[in-house]
Amino acid sequence: MKHNLLLITICFAAHFCLVGQSVWPGDVNNNGVVNAVDLLFWGVAYGAEGPARDMPSSDWSAQTFPEAWGQDFPNGLNYAYADCNGDGIVDEDDFDDAIEDNFGEDNPPIGPDQYVNASAGNAPSFRLTPSATLVQEGAMVSIDLSIDDSQMMLDSFYGVALQLSYTTGLLEGDDGPDFELQEDSWLEGDDSYVQELYADEDGMGTAQLAITRTNQQSIAAQAGTIGRFDLIVEDIIVGLEVDTFILRIDSVFLINDRMSIIPIVPDTAQVIIARDTSKLSTSVWEGMKALPHLNVFPNPTRNQLVLQAEVPVHQIRLLGPAGNIWIEETLRSPVFNRRLNVAGFPPGIYWLQALTDYGVLSQRLVILSP
């Protein structure tokens, strides 16, 4: 089938395998950190075999690079990096013992992961669909994850990595929503083994999700749930009668079996929480549902970020962890998109605020160490 999407070939600033280089177990794309994107490289290399390392280990330490394998990823990186435990085959043990166990470990300098979001109307879209949009405290809510390709066909899905953010302080245990992959979904339509990795980063308001096929064959997207986020709403902030939980896909990295990146539109879900839903007026409820979204990606970030708003933005302000202002910019003419440079900013949790005709829209942002 013809594919009318812009396909962007992956060109990471990877450390290509040379004599004397090391393997860090779990960092499959060799960019200095173990994260969701590594699962996609592992999924492409799944089942490959090659020379084992002399002293196989999945410990997070520099492992001696073996003899080069006979296959390379499109960016030139050798498949030996996908053999995380060094036993000479890329299989489930590499995921269990290295990618999952070493998730979040890093070995600077850290290279970028090329997340690519698309604009609405120009590409397929992710959909986050809550089981309810208005609930009372203590309610159990699920948010389905699916792909809508009704506007533009997605006929070559192989794997995806997502960076997510969510509202903290509203869920039971405040450790973020759980995720469960849908059994017997279209992802497994040809009996391909599918692996999922979900990491809620210590309840800090960010999470990563990766899903990959493993048979080196893409599949066409279909209607139906890919997986489900589950959450239990706890008490809302004292003094408030209503609050809103937001789950947002900030950045998307979706590939086909040739590891070409396919841009896709992210989505946001919101659930309005009330102490007593019977006392929430229709006008208040409709007003909250109609509040425009502010999207920031990549999130977390180290160097640059892009702000996307559904309404024109007149002023931008970035508040640091201590509440101090790091960026304040009044725009000569309103914009929907803006690129900001945060290179060198101290790591921590920031708040990006955008002044619009609908008021100030805010988005939580995590800046990582360089």
Image (cartoon, rainbow, N blue to C red):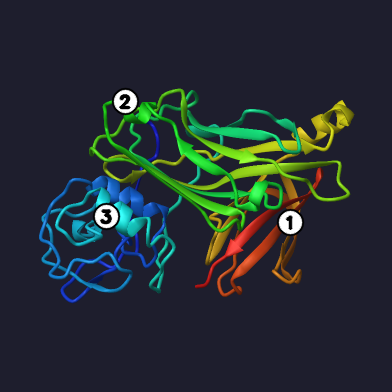
Compute the Cα span from label 1 to label 3. Answer: 41 Å
Q: Find the distance from the CA under tag 2 to the CA under tag 1.
A: 43 Å
Using the image, tell me which numbered label, if any, was put on residue 353: 1
Q: Is residue 311 left or right of residue 367?
A: right
- Side of 288 relative to 259 (left or right): right
Relative vertical location of residue 303 with respect to residue 183 in this rendering, above or below? below
Q: Earlier in the sequence, mark 1 or mark 3?
A: 3
Residue occupied by mark 3: 94
Q: Which amino acid does label 2 sit on?
A: Gly
The circle on residue 122 is none
Q: Which amino acid does label 3 sit on?
A: Asp
SS at badge 2: loop
Residue 290 visible here: no
Q: Is residue 83 left or right of residue 125?
A: left
Which residue is rendered at x = 79% and y = 36% of the image?
Answer: 288
Label 1 packing within 10 angstroms: few (<14), some (14-19), many (20+): many
Q: Which of 260 and 99 is in front in this view?
A: 99
